[in-house]
Amino acid sequence: MFVYYSYYMGYFGKLDERIKVQELRRKGYSYNEILQYVTVSKDTLSRWCSNIPLSVEQQNRLLKNKSLGQRKGSLIAAEKKREERIFRTNAIMNKAKKEVGKLNKRERFIAGLAYYSAEGDKSESKSGFANSDPKVICFMINWFKEFCNIPESKFRGALWLHEGLNDYQARRFWSKITGIPLEQFYKTYIAKNKQDSKKVRKNLHLYGVFSIRFCDVNIQRKILGWISGLFDAKIGTAL
């Protein structure tokens, strides 16, 4: 008797759920939406709803929701990959930064020569260093002061800027970075935009490319001599 009663109650409990499931399906609900109201498996839902036809409008709605769900899943997966890439990149960069550590005076001297050999003027009559990275410009202005003993009054600023960018804002930015007063800046060179060019410029420097200029032939010759000595130097190999 007890077994029969349990079966009887279980059957009608399931029957209530089945009726509810089928009513929701007739309204065009998806299986995932229906599962928010009942606690049965998807396989059970499929069996209970297999003979329930859906209108064209209901089918289109379910297809649209499925497409949106797949798109959302793709976006979530892409965002997760992006976060993992950023985490790995930061970990690598932080480790590398610690490997460099704090530079002593000679290491700063060599680093400045390497920078100048790459981005500095090489002729005897023209002295200066150009770059768009504020950190590099800051390093080099301090390098000139520390190793070349150039007084601030001798520094001049030169700016190369794309047409349409704010010249005054850019000059104030570099003046703050270098400590060179605005009155010691040359007239900004404005690079005209090519109207007929199909090239899309992705890296447009907001504050342009800045040049540290100074007029001292002897200092320029010394720097070129240092660079020559750097590349002529015999580099020992540890055994």
Image: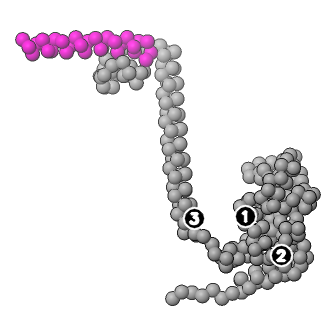
Q: Residue at x 78, y 67 (%)?
A: 141
Q: Is residue 190 left or right of residue 58?
A: right
Tell me how far mark 3 sits from mark 1, CA to CA.
Answer: 16 Å
Q: Position of residue 50 (x, y in %)?
A: 34, 18
Membership of 179 in magenta stretch: no
Kindly identify which residue carries mark 2: 122
Q: Start and end of the magenta stretch?
A: 1-29
Secondary structure of residue under mark 3: helix
Of callouts 2 and 1, the N-terminal one: 2
Mark 2 or mark 1, which is nearer to you?
1
Tell me how far mark 3 sits from mark 2, CA to CA.
Answer: 30 Å
Secondary structure of residue under mark 1: helix
Q: Position of residue 213 (x, y in %)?
A: 86, 68
Of callouts 3 and 1, the N-terminal one: 3
Q: Which mark is residue 97?
A: 3
Q: Is residue 218 left or right of residue 236?
A: right
Of callouts 3 and 2, the N-terminal one: 3
Q: Is residue 73 left or right of residue 171?
A: left
Quadrant of the drawing holding the N terminus: top left
